[in-house]
Image: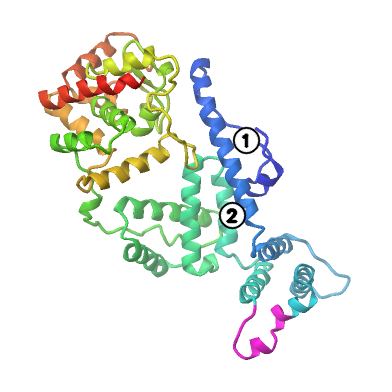
Amino acid sequence: MRIPSDAKEIIGKNEFCRNLHTTDLYEANIKKHKEIASMLEEIQQAKRDYEGIADKLSKEVQISKYAEYLREAKITTSENDDDTSVIKLELLENKLIDLHGLKKAHVILYGDEKQRKGQEPNSLAKKNFIEAHKLTDQSYSPLSLVSKKFLAEEYKSLKNSSYRRKQTHIEHFIKWSGYRDITMINNKIVGDYVTSIIQNNNPASATISNTVSNVGSFFRWAEERGYIEYNPFSNYKLSKRNKGSQNRKPWSDENIMTFLKSELIGVNEFIATCVSLYSGMRLDEICNIQKTVINDNCFKVLEGKTKASQRIIPIHPVLKPLVERFMDSKEEVYLIKGIKSGGYDNKRSWNFQKKLGRLRKKIGMPEGVVFHSLRNTFATQMENLDIPMNHISQLMGHEDSNMALDLYSKGPKIELLAESIKKLTYGKDVDSFIKNTLIEKSTFL
């Protein structure tokens, strides 16, 4: 896919080329639409970023870009003066005059009466010019510039959402640290940074770990490329933190009934919760259930974070009436209908997940009882029923599965999984309520 000119400046390439990682035409046709949607969303985001440059900081951005150009430029003179820093300074000042005009450029560079009285007119432009001048010196390696090179390489191998997350973490660190030279970052600064995150945001341990990992990967790359002598993140160990509110908890029968019986719960929320309870599927997998991935009384999960995520899940008897009604409907394409995609990867679950979170708070669900912990509930219930662990791993798409099951297998292994699924129960009251209500809810199809 070709990238429009106003998005090239941000994305840094002329076209997108994505590998669908499959030789199956049927699977490729399903995957390609999601990839195209993701590329279009990325282009739109790049256009928005590009348009954002045209605000009051646009001249500062141009100065910085020109400084980067001068940094790499080979400047020679007929004189014996091999110090090109003066020439670069003059060129940078001329650029400032071109952008602001002589009078305003003079104010930025030398100040005026207001500035002499302690005021700094357009101080942002002045600070930016000073930083831009430092940038022209190749011995100066600011975090902002070095990170651009790192992120340009990472962009080629990461999913858009992973790339954006890493970019955000690195940019946050750069801003927090005061836009320093990369060689000035040491262990103490790293420790202070992590402390500031904990004190200001009190995030979950996994969030801190991801942040440290993303920023640390940048410094590891910088060490390998010779920008720094050692990686200040290399030996940093995160302390164990007990933050009970962040721990995911299985849903009790009371939690299930409280949530599903709430008048705030709509058809989509009810169906998604029930499908997860009786299949162990992730929310994004449920949001992508189409008629084309239902066959032989099974759900087919065709993509995911790992190869193990691609799997076949027999449909539980409680869900069968819903699925049959869905398959007989003429208009519906998705089981979870009418939701708006969003996020960097344009996921169908993006906005729906946020809605579910808001509903849980309104209903008063306990902390830690979240949608994803329905998978934990599924696994716990299956274990209590003495279902073999390799069956549970296979059904949930875990990497640690001991039973290698081909995605398109029609053999007895599928039958074994179907028998295991049939044994799953949450008790007569919960099962009968969900089955009867699903039949009622499925009339919309």
Residue type of the residue flagged with mark 1: Phe
273 sits to left or right of 84: left
Q: Looking at the image, which residue is at 59% across and 53% down? A: 149
Q: CA distance from mark 1 to mark 2?
A: 19 Å
- Residue 244 percent across, percent down from the top left: 20, 53
428 sits to left or right of 228: left
> Does dot 2 land on a helix, a strand or a loop?
helix
> Up-down: is 150 above or below 408?
below
Residue closest to the far top: 411
Q: Quickly name the residue at label 2.
A: 148
285 sits to left or right of 61: left
Q: Quickly name the residue at label 1.
A: 16
Crowd tier of the residue under label 1, counting other residues whose Cα lies within 10 Å: few below 14, some 14–19, many 20 or above:
few
Q: Which residues are magenta?
A: 107-121
Mark 1–mark 2 CB contact (< 8 Å)? no
Q: Is residue 398 visible?
A: no
Q: Looking at the image, which residue is at 57% across and 61% down? A: 144
Residue type of the residue flagged with mark 2: Lys
Q: Looking at the image, which residue is at 61% across and 73% down? A: 124
Between 253 and 235, the one lying in front of the other is 253
Whichever of callouts 1 and 2 sits on the residue coming sooner in the sequence is 1
